């Protein structure tokens, strides 16, 4: 079986530095200290395949790109170089920076090579670029590495991509239509959430390991519940007036902040002390500097609807270093019951395997669903 393999080397770099993505702002991200993360994600996926499913390796021929756009990750994971055919190379690899044109050109070669599956590492922007070329001619599978992943073609984590590849090679999984969604990053950076459907792809159907598209929930009867949750959070803030609170992104947190007359960034991370915003839309380094001045720190988050992620999607500023400093016991998760109904588990994808395991070892987390009301919800990293 021929598997096309492509890595977007700059995917997700803008997350920890608070840029909400990397589209069009690569140089700014680098100047802010952003580091590549996609090669590591790709390495995890392929290493999981090699370690857990060695029986399928002889049945795969890899069609990839030179250097950081694919081949390096395969070699570093342990794939025999004889099993890799480099179909595309570009001068831009030397700088570690690639473009939409590189992705599209590479995918044209993959189509010409008649690949059976195209595995990519990136985010929604990468998915859009790929589908613009391959259309519905090749099934695709995404290894999540972007700041935002709304499309229904991604494995829930890099680890989950390994068994999906193996089961596809064994003929155990079917394919079907999946929506390619993307967020307008320019508007996103200005605080406006505008997600639209761009295309339809052929993806692997697997309910455990494939994330569903981000769900939007009707507000019928939810405002009253959000008011109750707000009362709970206000009591929390009043009872711990010496604590620095980090407000996560999303509509539920924004509703709470507005009700409490707290200035808030709906699509960023804000630092709140004594009900005042002392750090607006902060990035990882700004958070670390700010946190040094406070002994007590908590974070308030709401899971992404249907997907269930509390870390690893849209809030990469909350890096493993920051999460460890806060401590799992100081994480407050809030959600309306209607949202939880379609979100049966909480998920974490921090980029730190040991930290993810710490969450999984907890098995359950309390989710605030009203005033002094909580629900126990299972937590996982897959």
Image (cartoon, helix red, strand yellow):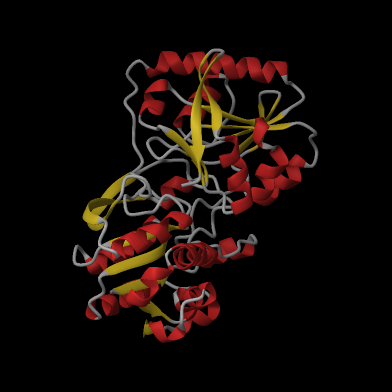
Give left or right: position of 377 versus 284: left
Depicted 327 relative to depicted 20: above or below: above
Residue 291: image location, x then y, percent: 74, 40
Numbered disc total: 0
Question: Which residue does the image show at 33% across and 50% down from the upper left?
Answer: 151
Residue 318 visible in image: no
The quadrant the N terminus occupies is bottom left
Give left or right: position of 91 versus 139: right
Give left or right: position of 194 versus 289: left
Residue 155: image location, x then y, percent: 39, 53
Residue 151 visible in image: yes
Q: Quadrant of residue 23?
A: bottom left
Depicted 94 relative to depicted 145: above or below: below
Query: Residue at the front extreme?
Result: 55
Give left or right: position of 380 versus 85: right
Q: Quadrant of residue 246?
A: top right
Depicted 151 relative to depicted 91: above or below: above
- Work out whether residue 195 or residue 365 is closer to the camera in this orientation and state it: 365
Residue 308: image location, x then y, percent: 44, 37
Question: Which residue does the image show at 43% across and 51% down from the upper left?
Answer: 186
């Amino acid at each position: 079986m021929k598997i096309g393999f492509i890595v977007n080397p700059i995917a997700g770099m803008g997350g920890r530095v608070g840029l909400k993505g990397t589209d069009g702002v690569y140089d700014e991200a680098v100047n802010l200290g952003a580091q590549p993360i996609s090669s590591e994600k790709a390495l995890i996926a392929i290493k999981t395949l090699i370690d857990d499913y060695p029986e399928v390796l002889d049945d795969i021929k890899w069609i990839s790109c030179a250097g950081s756009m694919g081949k390096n990750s395969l070699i570093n994971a342990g794939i025999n170089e004889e099993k890799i055919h480099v179909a595309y190379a570009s001068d831009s690899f030397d700088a570690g920076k690639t473009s939409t044109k590189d992705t599209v050109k590479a995918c044209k070669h993959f189509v010409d090579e008649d690949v059976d599956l195209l595995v990519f590492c990136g985010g929604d922007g990468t998915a859009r670029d790929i589908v613009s070329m391959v259309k519905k001619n090749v099934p695709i599978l995404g290894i999540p590495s972007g700041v935002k992943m709304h499309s229904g073609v991604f494995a829930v984590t890099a680890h989950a991509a390994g068994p999906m590849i193996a089961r596809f090679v064994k003929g155990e999984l079917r394919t079907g239509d999946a929506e390619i969604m993307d967020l307008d990053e320019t508007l996103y950076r200005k605080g406006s959430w505008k997600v639209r459907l761009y295309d339809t792809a052929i993806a692997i159907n697997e309910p455990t390991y494939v994330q569903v598209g981000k769900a939007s929930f009707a507000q019928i009867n939810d405002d009253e519940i959000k008011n109750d949750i707000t009362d709970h959070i206000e009591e929390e803030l009043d009872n711990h007036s010496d604590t620095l609170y980090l407000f996560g992104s999303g509509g539920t947190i924004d509703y709470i902040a507005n009700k409490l007359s707290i200035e808030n960034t709906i699509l960023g991370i804000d630092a709140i002390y004594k009900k005042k915003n002392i750090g607006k839309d902060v990035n990882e380094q700004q958070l670390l500097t700010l946190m040094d001045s406070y002994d007590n720190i908590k974070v308030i988050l709401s899971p992404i609807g249907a997907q269930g992620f509390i870390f690893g999607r849209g809030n990469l500023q909350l890096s493993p270093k920051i999460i460890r400093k806060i401590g799992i016991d100081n994480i407050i998760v809030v959600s309306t019951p209607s949202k939880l109904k379609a979100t049966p588990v909480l998920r974490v994808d921090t980029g730190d395997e040991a930290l993810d395991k710490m969450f999984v070892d907890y098995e359950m987390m309390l989710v605030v669903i009203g005033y002094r009301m909580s629900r126990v919800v299972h937590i996982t990293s897959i």
